[in-house]
Amino acid sequence: MTVAEALLDKQEIFPPPEAFAAAAAIPGMAAYRTLMAEAERDYEGFWARLARETLSWKKPFAKVLDETAAPFYKWFEDGRLNASYNSLDRHVEAGHGNRVAIIFEADNGAVTRVTYRDLLLQVCRFANALKKRGIKKGDRVVIYMPMSIEGIAAMQACARIGATHSVVFGGFSSKALHERIVDVGAVAVITADEQVRGGKVLPLKQIVDEALAMEGCDAVQSVIVYRRTGGNIPWVAGRDLWMHELTRGESDSCEPEWVSAEHPLFILYTSGSTGKPKGVQHSTGGYLLWAAQTMKWTFDWKPGDIFWCTADIGWVTGHSYIAYGPLVLGGTQVVFEGVPTYPNAGRFWEMIARHRVSVFYTAPTAIRSLVKTSELDPNTRPTAYDLSSLRLLGTVGEPISPQTWRWYYDQVGGGRCPVVDTWWQTETGGHMIAPMPGATPLVPGSCTLPLPGIMAAIVDETGQEEPNGQGGLLVIKRPWPAMLRTVWGDPERFRKSYFPEELGGHLYLAGDGATRDKDTGYFTITGRIDDVLNVSGHRLGTMEIESALVANPLVAEAAVVSRPDELTGEAIVAFVVLKRQGPGDGDARQLADELRAWVGKEIGPIAKPKDIRFGENLPKTRSGKIMRRLLRSIAKEEGITQDVSTLENPAILSQLGKSY
Ligand code: PRX
């Protein structure tokens, strides 16, 4: 850290602007503390109050929290509701049918607006069509879609009939898609012919076909295709159906399936420390409550706001802050098909100005890349656009450095808008530690304090709480309504990963390291403590990438670590041992490119290693354990300070020194 950064870290504090605070949902630290005290005094009462105020229940719940099968907690279980009813019908019934729900901007700039009434009708027709295909409550449906109104409607239609959706990010390969289709036991896949991003057309349906041609997908009876481009695509008669043909003539009313609050709304795969991604299972009631409640608190959402979250629906951020949170509150949001740099790096700012966006939520990696491009081309600087509609900015997915925070605050927010740095995870369902923008004084680089009702702490390796000023493991001490319920099909993995015995079995282990400021108690996230990488805000397991590499016929062994990267936060570095003699300098580059392409096919382009280093073997301890700390030093190209006397073959260190 530079001195300037250190000063920034310690001395720059940004209290909420007075006018902002006065109108905010949580209008000051006293209000925040009152909510926290309410939760501490009567934990169940606190959550019950919020659940009653924020959601519409078909049948009210009598029991709030059931801890009998801990850590398999249940919330509001005897209450019945429907996520789609909460997102759509109730706003139409309240007279807001003509309110715009989604302002969709396509890659080429074409804008489509859909009102709550029209979205409801579209979702009902689609839900009826799904039912006609035999899809019913409890079935799993995989959604592999571009950013689109149809993608959101597909999620909502599943929720309407009680089917559990599992959205797979459109950047994952056919193999990754196949793995998820099989694991979740999908009966249908909803996709598009192609997707359009940054002026390029990319296949989706073709990838679905490749995935379904692999073993174990017999349960998939229907592939429903949204026609986005009209391009040529492969077709399997009987199984494949156009979305527009399937829904034509369907009734535009569909009684929602009233499900228990514990009914699984969705399963979303995310990386863990083994080679196999985890199917994080979320509930309906607890999840929906928090998606909406955090909109009110962290984003201080108000009627009239134009909200824009730039995430993809393939990630949890796109679930909570596109497909559900904003709709549950009856908000108006921008949904964007494209990328921030097309047709130029001013696209975000141009769109904020065009749609008068008031709350903007994006990832530090996007901000970092736009800082860079704006230095090169003044026309793409945020200050070249009218961003006066903004009142609040947010970030998510990875740590944001104090410099990047300052740029966002000054250049994008014009020094007027609080920046909420939100820490959370696929597993937590919604924000966990984040500033309340009308209350919390901001410190760049810190996600500040837990949300009301969230009991976060830092503990040591035995589960003992650390005093402020000490670093350690980030845990959540009490169950909360939006927490994951289990790992799909693997309850033991759920228990071991998130409620480990070593910590006593009752603390939720986030998998992140953190520190708390001595004076303020503010949290700063220091990064993952497990074998999970964060590349451009995307979560990837080192084991997943290693498995992909060793699946290549040329590769004998591989180890993956990360190094810091200016743009992507972390960059993937792969150490590879080939089955044959190591490559000569000439073909090493070509081989590295081949391996990168291979990983792209196995997992997806986001998992391609940036650096590949070849060696005759990997540095291991006597007991055969790969010396990952040493690999990390090599990856960072810093001097090796570790003891290397146990290395079988110290000469490999010089081989590994070359990166391709
Ligand atoms: O390491 C933390 C990092 O992203 C991880 C969660 O990734 P994922 O489940 O894909 O969800 C991302 C979107 C919620 C965390 O364990 N992370 C997320 N937000 C922050 C963060 N690290 C630092 N600061 C954040 N604000």
Image (spheres, rainbow, N blue to C red):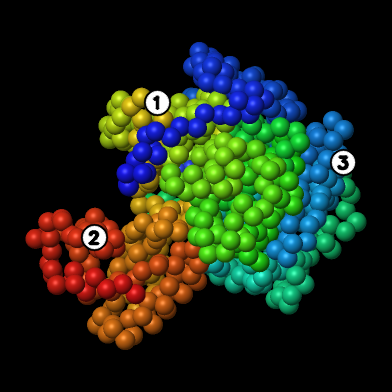
Secondary structure at numbered mark 3: loop
User: Residue 144: x and y, percent?
Assistant: 64, 60
Q: Which mark is residue 98?
A: 3
What's under tag 1, amino acid-wise? Answer: Thr
Camera-side mark, 2 or 3: 2
Secondary structure at numbered mark 2: loop
Contact between marks 2 and 3 (CB within 8 A): the answer is no
User: Residue 233: x and y, percent?
Assistant: 71, 75
- Quadrant of the image occupied by residue 238: bottom right
User: Residue 332: x and y, percent?
Assistant: 75, 42
Residue at the left extreme? Answer: 645
What's under tag 3, amino acid-wise? Answer: Asn
Q: Provide the residue designation for mark 1.
A: 520
Residue 222 appears in the rendering: no
Q: Provide the residue designation for mark 2.
A: 638
Q: Residue at x 43, y 73 (%)?
A: 596
Of label 3 and label 1, which has the lower sequence position? 3
User: Residue 319: x and y, percent?
Assistant: 62, 46
Q: The C terminus is located in which quarter?
A: bottom left
Give whichever of 421, 627 is nearer the camera: 421
In this picture, residue 146 sits left or right of residue 435 = right
What's under tag 2, amino acid-wise? Answer: Glu
Residue 611 appears in the rendering: yes
